[in-house]
Amino acid sequence: MSKEALVEVKNLKTYFYTEEGVVKAVDGVDYEIYPGETLGIVGESGCGKSVTSLSIMRLVESPPGRIEAGEINFQGKDLTKLSEKEMRKIRGNDISMIFQEPMTSLNPVYTVGDQIMEAIMLHKGVDRKEARRQAVDMLQKVGIPLPEQRVDEYPHQLSGGMRQRVMIAMALSCDPQLLIADEPTTALDVTIQAQILELMNSLKESYGMSIMMITHDLGVIAEVSDRVAVMYAGKVVEYTDVDTLFEDPKHPYTWGLMNSIPKLDKDVDRLEAIPGSVPSPLNFPEGCKFNTRCPLAEGKCFDVEPPLENATEGHKVRCWRYKDLEKIKERGERIYEDRGVLD
Amino acid sequence: MAENLLEVKNLKKYFPVKAGVFKRTVAHVKAVDDISFAVEEGETLGLVGESGCGKSTTGRTILRLLEATEGKVIFDGKNVMDLDKKEMRAIRRDMQIIFQDPYASLNPRMTVADIVGEPLDIHNLAKNKQERNEKVKEILENVGLGEEYMNRYPHEFSGGQRQRIGVARALAVDPKLIIADEPVSALDVSVQAQVVNLLQDLQKEYGLTYLFIAHDLSVVKHISDRVAVMYLGKIVELTDKKELFKNPMHPYTQSLLSAIPEADPKKKKDRIVLEGDVPSPVDPPSGCRFHPRCPKAFEPCPVKEPEFKEYGDGHFAACHLLDK
């Protein structure tokens, strides 16, 4: 891609200083988001995907958290260096965010209209009347029926799907260039999830914004992303475009994730489960962080952390043994052995 | 054909809605409204639906953790609803439950040995302490937890391990039926597969029968033999899983299947996006409960409730379109 990146994250490290020790939630993460694209960030709980996005928004609570190193370049500015005052102009205006649980991110004592208008009046400097008109307009754009009426309702009067639509209306009201969506459909039922994903895709086109989609659900990733970063234990372990990732996953973790979910169009007798669980961030292993669960781990994997390097042009992977994985895949074998009941 | 281990007949569970100074009952939440199905010995019946459809209430009512409003639950030839407390306690040895949240369903002050051993005490299945310990050890081993974990507390375990403890507790009394209520939905993706595999292995080994309640259709498809789809307190479709996914008859099942995001970016689905939200079960829509959201609704749908009946070999559905 020759276009210039909208956001460029370089070697970002966000640590939390707790009583038990230093939690390296994000530990050297690099990625770019280009104008008009959706970057999917996928990983399991504790992999650092949410902390990455909070770092971009500079919403990491400090103390205990701190952006330890790295750059977040956005429109020629390094966001890690901005003052809180400068950051406030960007937050909600150029970059906005929606969260998993809309009920906890909406204020229950204000009407949804008031909450959308607050952002519009703050960033666009228009009067109340105009802000209200724009709020109604936004509610209509996100598909809320009877927007003139809904604008005066409180969050508890709306269903989960409607609340998420309100959050999206609020996030888009100032025409942002980047929308960060942190598990926006995880709390929703599958038929409502389909509505919200459809809405986000159509709004992305009409607004021409970029989206950073954070989720644990590979289905959602496949549906909305252009490019994907797979995260594990505070690092990006694989980074490429969505088609390549699903066609040719090169990291054993990505491979395992894809084979541990049952497919609707393919029947298997047993799922290929990744053994063990995500290591505690207080106690990451030496060497490759996936070595405690990786069936291919050997020698070097336990001593030296592999770099994130190009396996092919534009397909980055952080693994010493991705070429061996390729051979196993060619032979059509499973890499995660079945250890049965007594695993 | 195998015998039915569990038969649910016209089961209803209404929760009263109370209001006013005298807490009069002003309405009912019809969480489960007249459903019937059977589970054969050794099979897994999946029960799917979105939040509020009544799937968990169904599971709990079968075990009489909630008292049914009406209907019969016949387990092993006995109507569970007629049993007194003592008989009920005895029959619970044969029907166990695994809950969704392994963080909330284990007592934080009990060691794993006590959590798993408690059902053995209740049903007098161990003669002495030593036998109890031996049994607990064996059960834990069967769910993939070693002896060294016996004296630890739930907070020392990861989510997947806690769910294994929940499974071990259910298994301790050697039940015939296990009702698994969203057993993997609180777990990380990579750990879900471990628990699903474990449940399948245990089924083979002990000849267990499962009622597997979940909202995730792909997991249900993987583990079940037959699947029942619920919507607003009713079963709308019930059939063999292959048939359901190949030939869904009910428009709700069709849209539910099309709504699942699939982990394949090349596949662009013709999605049926349903309008609106699930209506309140306090005042469900007249006629067919799905009609306000149904893309194919026609004249009889708002007025007449469709009958749940068989359309071809073991394929049950409730929809007026099928009679057209």
Image (cartoon, coloured by chain):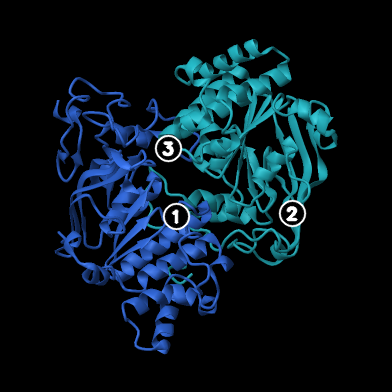
Chain colours: A cyan, B blue
Q: Amino acid at mark 2?
A: Lys
Numbered tag placed on residue A24 in the rendering:
2
Left or right of residue A312, residue B77 in this image: left
Q: Amino acid at mark 3?
A: Val
Give the residue furthest to the front. Answer: B21
Left or right of residue A313, residue A43 in this image: left
Q: Does residue B84 appear in this view?
A: yes
- Label 1: few (<14), some (14–19) or many (≥20) C-alpha neighbours in 10 Å: many
Q: Does residue A5 appear in this view?
A: no
Q: Name the residue that disc number 3 marks.
A: A190
A28 w.r.t. B256: above or below: below
- Residue B165 lies, in percent from the top left, at 46, 68
- Residue A243 lies, in percent from the top left, at 55, 36
- Chain ID at mark 3: A
| Total number of numbered discs in the rendering | 3
Numbered tag placed on residue B184 in the rendering:
1
- Chain ID at mark 1: B
For the residues beneath circles 3 and 1, the answer to whether they share a chain is no
- Residue B269 lies, in percent from the top left, at 41, 30
The span from disc 3 to disc 1 (Cα, nearest Å) is 16 Å
